[in-house]
Amino acid sequence: MRVVFLSAARQVWGAEVSLLTLSRGLADAGVTQAIVCPEGELATSATAAGIEGVHPVTPRSEAVDQGRMRESLRLWQRCLQVVRPGDTLVIFSYYLLALLPAVRPVLRRRGVHVALDLHDDFTSPKARAVLRAGSTAVDTVIACSRFTAAQLPHHPRISSLHRPVGLSTPPEVRADGSLDTTSSLDASAELDPVARARVERSARAHAATRQRARATDAAGRQPTTARSPASPPRGPAAPAPISARVPGDRERPLRVGVIGRITPEKRHELIIDALSQVRCPAQLVVRGGGDGFSGDLASRVLAHGAQVLGDRFVDEGRVEQESALADLDVLVVGNPREPMGRTVLEAQDRGVVVVVPDSGGSQELVRHRETGLVYAHDDAADLARTIEIVAADPRLAAQMAVAARRAVPRPGPYAREYLSRLVVGARSR
């Protein structure tokens, strides 16, 4: 069996990282692969990731927002040259579905099984129409969340599967807070040093707070903790500021991050407004940039952040994937209709506390106050109160960091499950 990925992406964002992660897992399972995509970052990354057949398509224009139909036609032309009889074709960009009904007869004659990796939320009537029409020519749909899968409720072969991150299996945390990698990881696997330091620090902080609690209980006193910001003091007096106490760190501003493309649905301005209401010392770190389709939104968001937060606003632009979560204490998702949120899993894997809205696919990844925190979507005040919990309750933050990392889906099992759904779909055509 050979899997051929078809993507219209030039850059590598969350979906493309998932594609490359899946590819590595399939390679470990002995699956031969190829990819058809535009020239650019994804094609280069696919080559570096070890995909045997990388078939980049030279765009007619250097503009990111060149005509999608024209670009789709060129990608499909190249794809038809690449696919062989018996291949499984996985479409990774939804708008390529517009031309699928036209080329489906050719693929069917070759015995090609067609799958759609569904990882977008469709709000425009045009996009929904493309999805509905194109999906009729798709044999199998694998969505990144139940929320995303609900957009095709009547497709006969649709399922959801959360993306994986990190190593094949999570390490165990010893009683002293260090990580035991001998029993749960392959001998050749190396844990990311940033993840190791953060999870060990959180685990040590958790152990220390438990020891203090036992000591005070033994002395016949109740352990003291900071008041939850969700329960402000009674009376007209203004609430006192909360000191930022990051688990395992000396006192310093809480570093709250928002990562990814600056697009309308990501709600950067909502997060900025929420940070302006946070009562503890905190910085907002923005890592990402415009996508080329949203006009001057990125510049307006950055100007708004600088105006509202001043030196508490840190714009770092696009950064390397390895640095996206570096030195963050909290990751916030603003999109109330996030298809899944790969950065949520990446943050959990690194011991960063995640804060997600109570809607969309990202909430499927979080159990409130167990593996992260949930706030009322589009409510800046509630988001501010939720962020403050991390500073006010370091013991809870440490517990959530350790529990979340254990719950993260891993690449090995994910790739095997993904492959099994492709195989079952191919057999049932």
Image (tube, rainbow, N blue to C red):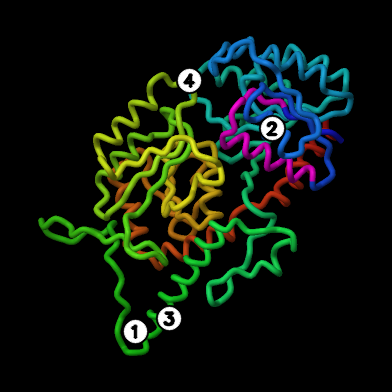
What amino acid type is highlighted by mark number 4? Phe
Depicted 345 relative to depicted 92: above or below: below
Which element carries disc 2, helix, strand or loop?
A: strand
According to the image, label 2 marks what residue?
141
Identify the residue shown where x is 10% and y is 56%.
236
The residue lying toward the viewer, choosing from 339 and 260, is: 260
Tell which circle, 2 or 3, labels the residue nearer the N-terminal end. Answer: 2
In the image: residue 131, left or right of residue 247: right
Query: Would you say the magenta stretch is mainly helix, strand or loop?
Result: helix
| CA gap, disc 1 and disc 4 | 57 Å
According to the image, label 4 marks what residue?
293
According to the image, label 3 marks what residue?
211
| CA gap, disc 2 and disc 3 | 49 Å
Identify the residue shown where x is 14% and y is 55%.
238
**Magenta span includes 63:** no
Quadrant containing the N terminus in the rendered view: top right
Q: Residues within 10 Å of mark 4 (few under 14, many from 20)?
A: few
- The residue segment tinted magenta is 6-27
| CA gap, disc 4 and disc 2 | 27 Å
For this orientation, the residue located farthest to the left is 236
| CA gap, disc 4 and disc 3 | 53 Å
What amino acid type is highlighted by mark number 3? Gln
The residue lying toward the viewer, choosing from 212 and 137, is: 212
Depicted 62 relative to depicted 352: above or below: above
Rendered location of residue 34, percent (x, y): 78, 30
